[in-house]
Amino acid sequence: MKKFIKTGLAIITAFYISTEISFAATPAELYDDVWKIVNKKYYDPTNNSQDWSKWRYRYEHKLKTVDDAYVAIDTMLASLNDPYTRFLPPKEFSEETQSIKGSLKGIGTQIGLRDGELVIIAPLEDSPAERAGLLADDKILEINGESTKGINVDAAADKIRGEKGTTVTLLIQRKGVPNKVYSIIRDEIEVKSVSSKPPFETTVIPEDIQYIRLSSFISKNAATEIETILNDTSGKKGYILDLRSNPGGLLTNAIYISDMLLKGGVIVSTVDRDRYKTTTRARYNQVSDKPIVVLINKGSASASEILSGALKDNHRATIVGEQSFGKGLVQEINKLPDEAGMNITIQRYLTPSGQDINKKGITPDVVVELTEEHVNNKDDVQLKKAIEVLEQITCVAQRNGY
């Protein structure tokens, strides 16, 4: 079976895209197809410590319509207690496919569940969500006046999405400030990946340092764009790679970019349900050996953590910022009949040092918190620290004759 590798999270997660297609003809067969996929591929062989076989015939002779099958499938998958393994009805599957292609409709924010609470993983660059002031780690208490308590990611995403020009209201809880209602006009979102422009124009980047902001790994061109920048700026003394609020994208992009920056060594390992470990190594295709500082925060997830973990564990970069999100699971997208689909967790991944960062995240070498006050004052203390650290590294390198 041919596979392509992909990441995102609520669009934020590491994905393989399966080309296997089921051909169910009835609601019962659709349900059984999903049961078989989980039984064969789910990364936890205990299926959340339960007898998975009990689900196969639980709804026998009871599924009369497609809607019956959808409800039964959702109930079955919920028993796994895994927010990333989910059924996608045709509309949602189409929307996810569009996001992979780099086109979205809504406000442009990645959402997920943390400890049962709906949170913003990261707003996309130059999206209505970012322009409205939404931040990584914001808790969404209400959507259009309705409580999000007990809501799942799919239902929340469906409420937030909508046609261009319509409005959605979110009640946001943010640490240290009163709850606030945000009214945001939906738009068609073009997913931009690479930029040399800092988040705040007030931050001055020294001429001999190249700043690269990678806001998403979704675009198939992201790795190529990074390579072009590295080649065009080879005269710079060092690089700042900003992965803050980057929720993920194509896993291949994380691997290719790691490959450009590493002289050798392990990039990432994955472990499946049979505990079979697959290790991906750098292929000695290094484009630049200049010093690197990587910026991460709570919204850096999945592919961002693979890249930052590879650079950190191989002692190739200094990591500055805040603890990352902690998304260490790999999903596969499976296309089902009638244009439906499902995402299923099939692997967990490990950093080169063997660390499982799921629900833990990557710990920065230099911890710097960006507070609400800093944001309001457009004072990017994390980027300033990254510049300071890179200046120190290059100064030492120059003294040592490198």
Image: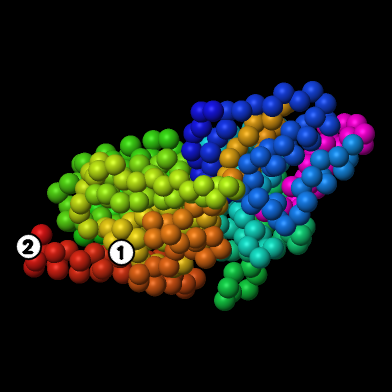
- State the image coordinates of residue 153 (x, y, percent, origin top left): 68, 51
Q: What is the quadrant of the N terminus in the image?
A: top right
Does 350 sit left or right of 116 as displayed? Answer: left
- The residue nearer to you, when weighing 63 against 98, is 63
| Residue 294, above or below 20 | below
Q: Residues within 10 Å of mark 2 (few under 14, many from 20)?
A: few
- Residue identified by numbered label 2: 401
Model colouring: rainbow
- State the image coordinates of residue 112 (x, y, percent, origin top left): 62, 55
- Which residue is drawn at the image coordinates 68% and 37% (left, top)? 37
- Residue identified by numbered label 1: 318
Q: Image quarter for residue 293?
A: bottom left
Q: Residue furthest bottom?
A: 176
Q: What is the quadrant of the C terminus in the image?
A: bottom left
- The residue nearer to you, when weighing 88 against 33, is 33
The reply to whether callout 1 and callout 2 are in contact (CB within 8 Å) is: no
Q: Which amino acid, mark 2?
A: Gly
- Which residue is drawn at the image coordinates 78% and 42% (left, top)? 73
Magenta residue span: 61-83
Let me know if residue 3 appears in the view. yes
Q: Is residue 326 magenta?
A: no
- The residue nearer to you, when weighing 169 against 353, is 353
